[in-house]
Amino acid sequence: MSYSILIVDDSLPMRSVIKKTIRAAGFGQSEFLEAANGKEALTLLKNNWVDMVLTDHNMPVMNGLDFILAVKADELLKTIPVVVISTEGNESRIKEFLDGGAVGYLAKPFAAEAIRDLIVKFLGEASDDENNVDGNENLDF
Amino acid sequence: MMKTMLTAMKTSISEVMETMFFLPVEFSEEPSIKEIKGIKGRQNKACRLDFSGDRSGSVYLLVPRGLLSQMAENFMGEPAESLGDEILEGTLTETLNMITGNALRKVKAEKPFALGIPKLVPGAEFPETEGTLIIDTPGPQMAIHITLW
């Protein structure tokens, strides 16, 4: 089964690394949408359905927390699971993310396995025929 | 406070460089101005990130271009020759973001720290005052500096 995943991060290399890591974790047939901030992400969500959102917090224009609050205030979008992947991770900030509606939090820097575990936790295990679709990718990104 | 920040920064740099870039690092503390100028004299890229909280300040990161290419290659899993300036600069700013955020998580604070957005700056702006660490890598050295306001 393929999924549609939205990655929101102002860092182009980080978006690329997260995407590669998810593909290498066995979700090679998934489709990815990318946005550089919360505002761009909301625009994408108006016209595209996604199964999951992975968002940074510390971004220009609209940060991750404001983006989560906007998603959770929207009747059509509020059921989409949103996970925060961010360097900002003191206890009170994580509580803000979770109280705002995020279903999980992962601190940067992260091991590739942590991304895989997140995807499996919220979307389920990848099926065998999806594993290593690109052939030359592995978890050592 | 500066000593606490530098200690947290060293742990954070090791974690980020090893986890995301697969590069082991060691540190030279209290480097001389000559050593800092030596890194500033190379082809390099630099960026700055402001933070606020119990204490506010700025963190600067200065990385020689050759090392930045190596980091981007390891990070992206693609040959350095195929990676343009946008990727190199994105790698630089994301590195500073991860290092600073990870370090500040390790510092006990009554008021939580908040990070700004990393900005590219000319290498010449890298401060030559105390609060600097020189980082030895398997390749060229890089440097990080903390200014507390």
Image (tube, grey):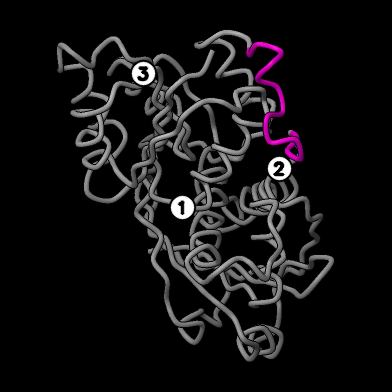
Residue A61 is situated, as x and y percent measured from the top left of the image, at: 22, 49
Which residue is at the front of the view, A94 or B89? Answer: B89
Q: Could you classify mark 2 by the number of other residues whose Cα lies within 10 Å: few (under 14), some (14-19), or many (20 or more)?
A: many
Which residue is situated farthest in the right direction here?
Answer: B138
User: Which residues are drawn in magenta?
Assistant: A126-138
Label 2: state its secondary structure: loop
What amino acid is labelled 3 in the image? Ala
**Could you give the CA–CA distance between mark 3 and mark 1, rounded to whole angstroms?**
22 Å
Q: Could you classify mark 1 by the number of other residues whose Cα lies within 10 Å: few (under 14), some (14-19), or many (20 or more)?
A: some
Label 3: state its secondary structure: loop
Identify residue for label 3: A102
Report the quarter where the C terminus of chain A lies.
top right
Q: Residue at x 63, y 66 (%)?
A: B82
Residue mark closest to the camera, 2 vs 3: 2
Residue A27 is situated, as x and y percent measured from the top left of the image, at: 60, 23
Rendered view: A66 above or below B30 = above
Q: How many marks?
A: 3
Label 1: state its secondary structure: helix
Identify residue for label 2: A141
